Image: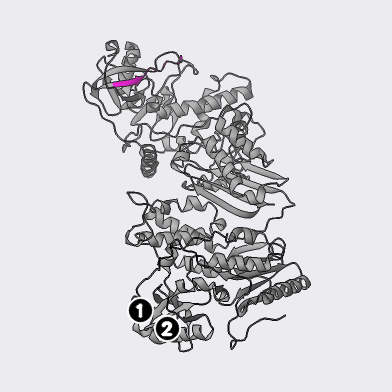
Amino acid sequence: MERNNKTSEILPFTTTIQASIRTKSEDPIYVKQYPYPMSDNEFINNEIQKLIDNEIIQPSRSPYNSPIWTVAKKGTDDQGKPKRRMVVDFQKLNAQTITDRYPIPDVGMTIQNLGKAKIFTTLDLESGFHQILIKESDREKTAFSVNGAKYEFLRMPFGLKNAPSIFQRCVDDILRPYIGKFAHVYIDDVLIYSSSPEEHLEHIRTIVNALHTANMKISDEKSHFFQDSVEYLGHIIKHNKITVDPNKVDAIKNYPIPTNLKELRSFLGLASYYRKFIQNFAAIVKPLTVHLRGENGGISKNQSAKVKISLDQAALDALNKVKDALQAQVELFQPEFTKPFELTTDASNFAIGAVLSQNKKPIAFISRTLNKTEQNYSTNEKELLAIVWSLQKLRNYLYGIADLTIYTDHQSLIFSISDKNPNTKLKRWKNFIEEYGAKLVYKPGHQNVVADALSRQQINNTASSCSEHSGQSSPSEGIKRVKQPLNAFRNQIIPIFDENKMIEIDTCTVFPDRVRHIVYYKTKNELIDRLKKIANPKVQNALKLNEETLFHVHENIIATFPPNLFVIAQTQLEDVTDLDKQKEIIINTHRRAHRNYINNAEEILLSYYWPKHTTTPIHHSTTNSQVERIHGTLIEISTALAQQNNSSPRDELFNAVKQYNKTIHSTTGYRPEDVFFNRERYPDIKGTLEHKQEKLLNYHNKNRHPINYKEGDLIYAKTHRRNKNNIKYSQHKVKEDRGDTILTAKGKIIHKDNIRRQATQCTNQQDL
């Protein structure tokens, strides 16, 4: 095995190719030499002499000229001084050079094509570009001046626009029979990979002989032979595994907080190189990417350093998340194309992502943000877009694969891609998916933990302590534990149980924006699941919390319960009780009924119990949502009890109320009956209730703006007529704006949620 490695020898050049520099015009390009540090004079003179001794440059009389400069290199020299490199600034020449379109290999594809290789060797071609001669007619274009002298390159210099493409083509031509079989080339880096030592030795001999025949020189210092793991293009390659080079991770970890657009782009460019190692990368860096564009559109590279930016807390958190994700040293595995592939996709409101895996071992993470048009897609379209885009992105892996399963946590997609769906866009995407012969499988969110993290990128899930539920049980009985996955508690309702038994409860997880009471009861009876109902997370009104209990009472009458029964919901205590058990004076009540519906008898009754009472607007149940929500729960519980006990829901109402009052409330952390009969606890939970109230109000009103009307304004209000042929909105004239509601000229109270917009003119005076 022969290699040119003697330092005393002149650097050889290949005989297979000569580099040409094709320009758009033959007019000479001349750039005046700009000053460089005088302290670099000696270094520059030594570099010029080395280039002359190696027959890389020669004196020139060219009409062209490019300036020189010096830049820092890693490490120090023998005298302990920082290393320097002399470079020629070919910017003006490159601007006039016709681009050589020869492709540079894709790093990801190169690394993923290593198969089951166990032994690796990396070869570095010494002073790579200098091993290619420049065509004689083009040498004058590389001229530069220094210290009163002028030189031009005989060999291809660093800094030319087409130098990487020319060198890539040269080495590809030399090693073409072996590329993809046991060798890969990325410009001047050659990777040799094999499954056994004997095979590897033969492969090295073949590659080195081919390079020697082409008169290419290998650098001993930068080459590594017979390695179990090697550093290649910023990655650590092992048998069947790929990780990030720790040196590159340190560079990202120590990257300072960007203060201008150029620094931010540099960080994102460096981090994006390793995005395949970071799950949901696009979603994580979303707070950073919003800073990439100025107020008036895109900002050029030259101007980016002048654009100052100040990262908010969300952007700083995203910066740290990227650094932490890379420090986690995620391992990606090499694909085995004879085994089944699994593609797990997910979509959120602002990004889509996917994970390609085999036997639950990740091969690649991919993600991207949605553009403005895609953000307006329906949930079905976003989920299907995630599948289509993932198949396009991973086409080199998946096209032609015999066994591919696509997992989604959106069950309605199964219908969306059926032949019965008339949506032409979805039909087109369906045809594209069918090209891959993939099976689409629904996997619930709590099982689809790989990709479903994307959907919860901005959600802070907080687990509450274990809920405890007891009926009439002996003190000796204890609460047992049952292991269940975290998300198994979503949308569950209060369990139904026998009063003579203790309930077996596992960890209770609360999702406060969606469900009021969430517990899990291990039972074979599926009746609960068939009766469950998802609560509305919106908060229409928030009453001020008072220092005393029983201040606000909400009343609602529904036909399901006996006419002589009342259910009262207290805002503070969340306790459900019978009217005849109330012992304290009640100051205020909310009643879901138009005032015209309250007869004299009820007026007297209300005045006797509650000196002050208000009514809610019609067609706006959320104003009285406290008792509305409780009624929904009581109906579900009483219906389930009636099914089990072969009775009627009305007969089981008191049992339902009893079970409700024995259930720990998700916000207060106490059972309603404990708080009701132990009033001193109320000051302790008042702060918790106020925090909960503020959080829900902020969530509900984050994208809402107050709308005020003045007397005489014309508005459109919903008619709430279900017949599709009826007019959906009627016109009204405003008499008074009461905050959440409007009083019309005819004395009708309308909630602002039922007002579509302000009318520009009146077309039907009778409605006013």
Front residue of this view, candidates 9 and 615:
9
Amino acid type at mark 1? Tyr
Front residue of this view, candidates 367 and 731:
367
> Is the residue under label 2 in contact with that under label 1 (CB below 8 Å)?
yes
Query: Which span of residues is magenta-colored?
Result: 715-723
Residue 148, image x and y in percent?
Answer: 36, 83
Residue drawn where x is 53% and y is 76% of the image = 155
Residue 79, image x and y in percent?
Answer: 45, 89
Task: Using the numbered discs, state the Cα–Cα distance from disc 1 to disc 2 in whole angstroms.
Answer: 10 Å
Residue identifier under label 2: 44
Q: State the SS at label 2.
A: helix
Residue drawn where x is 75% and y is 67% of the image = 195
Image quarter where the N terminus lies is bottom right
Residue 201, image x and y in percent?
Answer: 75, 74
Residue drawn where x is 39% and y is 15% of the image = 727
Q: Is residue 577 left or right of residue 596?
A: right
Residue identifier under label 1: 36
Question: Which badge, 1 or 2, comes first in the chain's sequence?
Answer: 1
Q: Is residue 523 left or right of residue 460?
A: right
Image quarter where the C terminus lies is top left
Residue drawn where x is 49% and y is 64% of the image = 22
The type of colouring in the image is: one colour
Residue 136, image x and y in percent?
Answer: 53, 74
